[in-house]
């Protein structure tokens, strides 16, 4: 059994003040100092191009691509650099040939970027979009397995899944679901937005057709950049935008690279954030975040809030609910106390990261006690 070395608090690498509890990594993360500095250095490339030859920028693209590939257990040739997860999902949907009459499976209340492109595909190919309702017992995995194998249902065409529900961290166990999807003959598309950087991701284990994640949340990078893994069998498709960089002789997933790829600012920022996450080991990050969210859950339940049992939620995101609904203006009142969180679909979503510590937990609980 492999022992995971404990990850100490990394707050010293960030600019988060001591009196701020930033528990909103699932929305977007603060930048580590090193990532901000990489962006500032990149600005000089564009500001003073005579002093910084742009011929050096493509190497930054390959550095970022290689780091993204390592994070998900892929080869660099299997990863495209795109502008957003919605860009990635549009690319995936455009390159899945499916027979009419099948099902597109997803969970209810899914994030829009995982829906729109496949809704369009469903209309074009006469597919049925099936949204699995939120299960009363919180077990998304069991509900999805039942939907996949339901007798008499239209054949599975595509499963668009995430490793957790984005609103509250409800576990969607792809270790159990991916084999069932493959056995059904469906394509598997994964949005790893709320996972990559906070928990281990392994495309070799899940074998998705496509998997995507952005850099502005858990991988501690900039806005406006994302990565798309394409399985080798899915790399002979067409990009949704044609540019000089993704036409032959470009091969592999590079066929899906975005235009204006060689950004001297975003690429080194993304690479720096990804390399920092890799230096910690996502498994160690997950173990640290589990300790924090478990403490938050225990304390919050003492205040009359409820959370899913630990085995039905992921380590990095905690959703708290109140019997009669959350009080109006809750997140605004928490912000006044220096606690930053989000409300999503009736849940108070708390999402710490490597900068978070026990003081953040205590400040959050004290603020909730006052507000509630």
Image: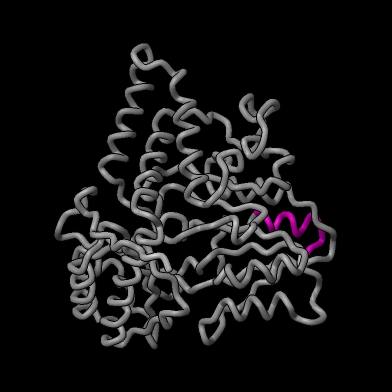
Q: Position of residue 62 (x, y in %)?
A: 50, 33
Which residue is rendered at x = 32% and y = 23% of the image? 44
Residue 69 image offset from top left, x and y in percent: 52, 45
Q: State left or right for residue 372 relative to residue 258.
A: left
**Residue 129, placed above or below residue 153:** above
Is residue 115 at least partly visible in the picture?
no
Res. 268 image quadrant: top left
Name the quadrant of the N terminus: bottom left
Residue closest to the far top: 50
**Residue placed furthest toward the front:** 1
Pick whichever, 135 or 269, lies toward us.
Answer: 269
As drawn, the residue found furthest toward the right would be: 100
Magenta span contains residue 112: no
The answer to whether residue 6 is above or below residue 321 is: above
Of residues 41 and 332, the one nearer the viewer is 41
Q: Is residue 341 left or right of residue 357?
A: right
Going by the picture, which residue comes out furthest to the left? 18
The residue that appears at 46% across and 34% down in the rendered structure is: 63
What are the residue bounds of the magenta stretch? 117-127
Q: Residue at x 69, y 45 (%)?
A: 232
Residue 81 picture location, percent across and down: 54, 39
Relative horizontal placement of residue 237, taking residue 171 as reference (left or right): right
Question: Can you give x and y, in whole percent of width and height, for residue 295 in the image?
Answer: 28, 77
Residue at the image position 29 percent from the left and 70 percent from the top: 292
């Amino acid at each position: 059994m492999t022992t995971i070395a404990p990850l100490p608090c990394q707050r010293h690498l960030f600019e988060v003040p001591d009196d701020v509890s930033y528990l909103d990594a699932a929305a977007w993360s603060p930048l580590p100092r090193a990532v901000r500095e990489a962006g500032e250095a990149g600005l000089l490339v564009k500001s003073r191009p005579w002093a910084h030859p742009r011929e050096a920028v493509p190497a930054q693209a390959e550095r970022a691509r290689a780091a993204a590939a390592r994070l998900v257990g892929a080869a660099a040739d299997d990863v495209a650099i795109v502008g957003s997860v919605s860009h990635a999902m549009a690319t995936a949907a455009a390159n899945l040939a499916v027979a009419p009459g099948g099902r597109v499976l997803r969970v209810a209340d899914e994030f829009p970027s995982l829906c729109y492109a496949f809704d369009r595909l469903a209309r074009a190919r006469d597919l049925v979009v099936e949204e699995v309702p939120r299960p009363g017992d919180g077990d998304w995995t069991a509900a999805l397995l039942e939907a996949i194998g339901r007798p008499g249902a239209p054949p599975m065409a595509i499963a668009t899944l995430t490793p957790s529900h984005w609103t509250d961290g409800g576990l969607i166990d792809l270790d159990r679901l991916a084999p069932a999807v493959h056995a059904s003959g469906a394509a598997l598309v994964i949005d790893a937005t709320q996972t990559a950087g906070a928990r281990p991701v392994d495309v070799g284990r899940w074998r998705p057709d496509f998997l995507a994640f952005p850099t502005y949340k858990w991988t501690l990078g900039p806005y406006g950049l994302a990565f798309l893994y394409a399985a080798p069998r899915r790399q002979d498709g067409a990009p949704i935008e044609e540019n000089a960089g993704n036409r032959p002789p470009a091969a592999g997933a590079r066929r899906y690279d975005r235009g204006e790829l060689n950004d001297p600012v975003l690429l080194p920022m993304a690479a720096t954030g990804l390399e920092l996450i890799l230096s910690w080991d996502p498994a160690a990050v997950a173990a640290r975040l589990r300790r924090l969210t478990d403490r938050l859950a225990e304390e919050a339940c003492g205040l009359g809030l409820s959370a899913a049992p630990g085995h039905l939620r992921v380590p990095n995101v905690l959703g708290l609910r109140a019997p009669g609904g959350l009080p109006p203006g809750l997140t605004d009142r928490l912000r006044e106390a220096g606690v930053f969180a989000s409300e999503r679909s009736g849940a108070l979503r708390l999402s710490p990261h490597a900068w978070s510590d026990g003081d953040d937990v205590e400040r959050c609980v004290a603020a909730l006690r006052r507000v509630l």
